Amino acid sequence: MTREETRILLGEAETRFEQEGKLIRLESGRAIFVGDTHGDLEATRTVIARYLNSKTQIVFLGDYVDRGPKSAENLNSLLRLKLEHPDNLFLLMGNHEGQGAISFHPADFWEGLDRERRTQYAIALSRMPLAASTPNGIIALHGALPDVETLEDLEKIEFGGQQWQQITWGDWQEEDGGYLGDDLLTGRPQFGQGWFDEMMRRLKKNVLIRSHQPNARQAIYGRRCLTIFTSSAYRELIPRRTIAIADLEREVKTVDDLVIETV
Ligand SMILES: [Mn+2]
């Protein structure tokens, strides 16, 4: 893309994200949840070809760039699709979209951009929504649950703040307890089942659908916390790309009320 094309695409995407706010509320029909794609353009194309239609809402859980071979193509095609299908496709923020708040290394997409483009991408992506909620018991976001009192509080989360870090960087561990400290190697905040149970009670949700943590077991905490991954970038840890499908007309109490598919 030329500089001018990039500027226009990012400007339009930024406006759209600002209109959406931080919390997407899905109302009815069917929802498809897609985990990290991480430069796997082919995974994105497969999902779009298979599931995009007027009765379906596709929610991508963040991390569109870095790690895989086609970061710019993957991100730019998702931004274009978002503008073409604003009510059927939603792009949540992952930590890899938050480079403007916490920069990390390696980040091949960001490190390959010149200063002007890096700033433009960082500003536009900082406006992305953070979570999606359904009327039948699901909350979806990139990493872990933030320390908020109610669902409505998600709208007030500030880019780069502590709650933002919990959402975009947080990991779950199969331990009791709440906040378990930051991982010494990665700096990621770690949370246990006590935190999960408390925050799900506050949000009045049954099932969390998230991505971000390739070494997590798919279903934990009484099968109420689902981790999906939709990229070939971590093929050694995750040999299959998975998505989750929810019928929004039926209550979802555990992961077993969802359909998991391979793409
Ligand atoms: Mn991530």
Image (cartoon, rainbow, N blue to C red):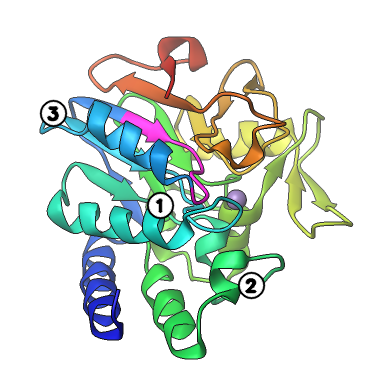
Question: To which residue does mark 2 refer?
Answer: 102
Identify residue type, mark 3: Lys
In this picture, is 193 found above or below 65?
above
Residue 38 within the magenta-colored segment of the rendering: yes
Q: Which residue is mark 1?
A: 92
Labels 2 and 1: the sequence-earlier one? 1
Q: Residue at x 37, y 62 (%)?
A: 128
Query: In this image, 176 relative to 73: left or right?
Result: right
Q: Nearer the viewer, residue 121 or 21?
A: 121
Please report the bounds of the magenta region as a residue range. Answer: 32-39
Residue holding disc 3: 55
Quadrant in which the C terminus is drawn = top left
Quarter of the figure with residue 188: bottom right
Mark 3 burial class by Cα count in 10 Å: few <14, some 14-19, many 20+: few
Residue 206 location in percent, x, y?
A: 48, 24
Question: Is 247 displayed left or right of 156 in the figure?
Answer: left
Q: CA distance from mark 2 to mark 1?
A: 17 Å
Q: Which of pointers 1 and 3 lies earlier in the amino acid sequence?
A: 3
**At x 66% / y 22%, what residue is drawn?**
220
Q: Is residue 213 above or below residue 80?
A: above
Residue 179 or 169: which is nearer the viewer?
A: 169
> Circle 3 sits in a helix, a strand or a loop, which is it?
loop
